[in-house]
Image (spheres, helix red, strand yellow):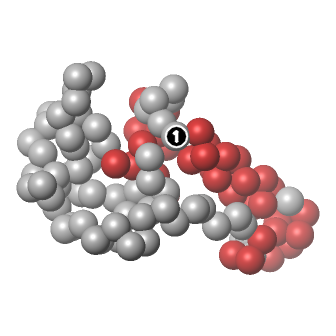
Amino acid sequence: MDGSSALQIRLGPFDYAMRNYSIEHFPSGCLCGAGNCRGSVTGWKDVSAERKADYEGLLAPYLLEIDRELTASVASPRARGRGFARPSALKTPPRRFDNFW
């Protein structure tokens, strides 16, 4: 593996953010060379709203669920009173590849 954030598959480049909420163990810069590359290997939590819209229908459903939960927690009366949501109130995404490397 060359450290790129995109794998060439039959449909074109694959962004790891389409399947992973957070990515912490990749180099900071992407080496894929794709014209629409985001430039770094990061997870869904770091993707812009515009790019998230571009990925509609192509990503893991649990990522949308996390976004909905975060939006709901920020909009709740308890969170509005403080201006932020308590981290303990947010669902932690599954960590599926903790021992991958």
Residue at 49 percent across and 57 percent down: it is 21
Q: Is residue 55 visible?
A: yes
As drawn, the residue found furthest toward the top would be 11
Against 61, is 99 above or below?
below
51 vs 14, nearest the viewer: 14
Residue at 57 percent across and 47 percent down: it is 63
Q: Secondary structure at mark 1?
A: loop
Against 48, is 8 above or below?
above
Q: Tell me which corner region of the image, top left, top right, bottom left or bottom right, holds residue 12.
A: top left
Per the image, the residue denoted by label 1 is 60
Q: Using residue 71 as the reference point, say whether residue 27 is left or right of it.
A: left
14 vs 47, nearest the viewer: 14
Q: Tell me which corner region of the image, top left, top right, bottom left or bottom right, holds residue 37.
A: top left
Q: Position of residue 48 (x, y in %)?
A: 43, 47
Task: Report how many numbered discs are placed on residues in the image.
Answer: 1
Residue at 90 percent across and 63 percent down: it is 77
Q: Quick one: label 1, few (<14), some, or many (20+) residues within 10 Å?
A: some
Q: Quadrant of the C terminus?
A: bottom left
Q: Quadrant of the N terminus?
A: bottom left
Q: Is residue 83 visible?
A: no
Q: Position of residue 26 (x, y in %)?
A: 24, 66
Q: Tell me which corner region of the image, top left, top right, bottom left or bottom right, holds residue 7.
A: top left
Q: Position of residue 68 (x, y in %)?
A: 70, 47
The amino acid type found where label 1 is placed reads Ala
Residue at 52 percent across and 40 percent down: it is 60
Q: Using residue 70 as the reference point, say whether residue 36 is left or right of it.
A: left
Against 4, is 98 above or below?
below
Q: Using residue 95 as the reference point, say whether residue 54 is left or right of it.
A: left
